[in-house]
Amino acid sequence: MRDDPNPARADRDSAPRIVIIGGGFAGTTAARALERRLRTAEIHLLSAENHLTYNPLLPEVVGASVLPGHVVAPLRQMVRRARVHQVRVTAIDTAARRVHYRGGCETGSLGYDHLVLACGNSANLRMIPGLAEHALPLKTVGDALFLRNRVIARLEDAELTENPTLRRWLTTFVVVGGGFSGVEVAGEISDFLAESRRWYRHAELEPPRVVIVHGGPHLLPELPERLGRFTERKLARHGGVEVRLSSRSRAIDARGVTLHNGSRIDAGTVVSTIGTAPNALIEALPAEKQRGRLCVDADMSVPELPGVWAIGDCAAVSNSRANGAPCPPTAQFALRQGPQLAANIARRERGAPTRPFGYRPKGLMSAIGHNRAVARIWGVNLSGFIPWLLWRGFYLLYIPTFARKARVYLEWNWAMFFPPDIAHLRFTRTVDERDGS
């Protein structure tokens, strides 16, 4: 076991060691900002993956609008001086100021002067009976690839059968949740099915079915009701997506979804875009939480734990520009919290007072398929093609690294003029078929 000593700086002029847990938007932007503000600091970025995943584009991977490799960016290419460790953090000893981790071939620990928690949250696959066993989440690139393959496999299986009941079951897709992720993945699946049906004879006979099950009175509860109603109409008119409002899933099984009113939707694929659970590291910390998120002071420091800071989805950061209301767990806020946190750590090192976090969001946007989007920007509601262009421009601006911006831009333009890739990609190793394995 490798044990890196804690600096325990008696001499305050020596370089601080800053350990960041989490390689998402919040952790990565914090590391980059700390490199600029504390040029002598020793910065360590710990992440279970060696890349950042651009989660808002995962539905586009499902719909084959972009390639999987274009929505990830290697952490080592995003930072300059920070040391990246692809490890899984197993424990945090706040009394000794140490972080314990497990890598691919060894375990170890790191001492810290400042610890930044940006580890996000986990998917809650236990909130509905049968969710973990029978529904497909959409949290990672692996989830998106698996779902894309599932959609294609269902079309291929439907092409083989002459049983119309089985074919209808195979080509029915249910999306649980009508928030941003649910609407976007339903729109992408619908578009993909519409573009692919020319190659599937039975799809012409019986069009595939996409259903959104949402517990609220309108889609996209984060946006005004008018935009939610517009989204519902456009999904139904152009994509043929059915929307079940004020409907909650009571149970999910291998054959489909049972709703709270006892009705059934038989479906060969169920996608879950709801439910989050606290990160296990956060749960284990001796600090106050709010709905599974760490309670932090206005400057994003954890009051009960000296030297510990928290940002992103795992922290209940208050927004000084919204009357102290907690920031929503979105990339838009994580991208601003990282640099503000770096500035506060630099001020703490200088002995200067820290500043509260404050950010006034520009707006919220969601793509709904068929080159359409809905948005609320600076208090103005927009819908149609123009907000779709704004949606793409906004996300293109914040995609990490110039190389990936160029790749995604080319992929988007390619997808506008050419059909989607319907190849079913198997991730299997070659075996000797003669041994029967």
Image (spheres, helix red, strand yellow):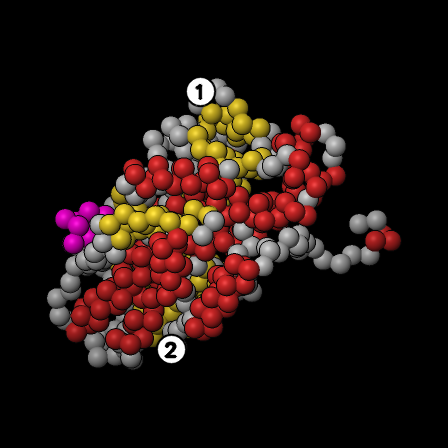
Could you say which quadrant of the image residue 267 lies in?
A: top right
Residue 50 badge: none
Secondary structure beneath label 2: loop
Is residue 104 magenta-colored? no
Residue 383 x/y as whole percent:
34, 48
Where residue 34 appears, as percent x and y from the top left, is 29, 72
Q: Position of residue 16 (x, y in %)?
A: 28, 73
Q: Residue at x 76, y 58 (%)?
A: 430
The residue shown at (14%, 48%) is 323
Element on which disc 1 rests: loop
Q: Earlier in the sequence, mark 1 or mark 2?
A: 2
Stretch in magenta: 315-327
Name the residue at 80% across, 50% down.
437
Amino acid type, label 2: Arg
The one nearer the camera, 150 or 376, is 376
Query: Around disc 2, counting alpha carbons within 10 Å, would you say few (fewer than 14), some (14 to 19), or many (20 or more)?
Result: some
Q: Is residue 304 above or below residue 132?
A: below
Of residue 375 and residue 273, the one placed in the foreground of this image is 375
Position in image of residue 166 (x %, y %):
68, 30
Between 388 and 293, the one lying in front of the other is 388
Q: Which residue is mark 2?
A: 81
Q: As drawn, is 138 to the left or to the right of 376? A: right
What's the residue type where badge 1 is placed? Answer: Asn
The 10 Å Cα crowd at callout 1, few under 14, some 14 to 19, many 20 or more, is: few
Residue topped by disc 1: 261
Q: Quadrant of residue 337?
A: bottom left
Asked if labels 2 and 1 touch by Cβ distance under 8 angstroms, the answer is: no
Res. 133 in view: no
Q: Is residue 369 above or below residue 132?
A: below
Q: Is residue 324 magenta?
A: yes
Horizontal side, residue 402 vs residue 210: left or right: left
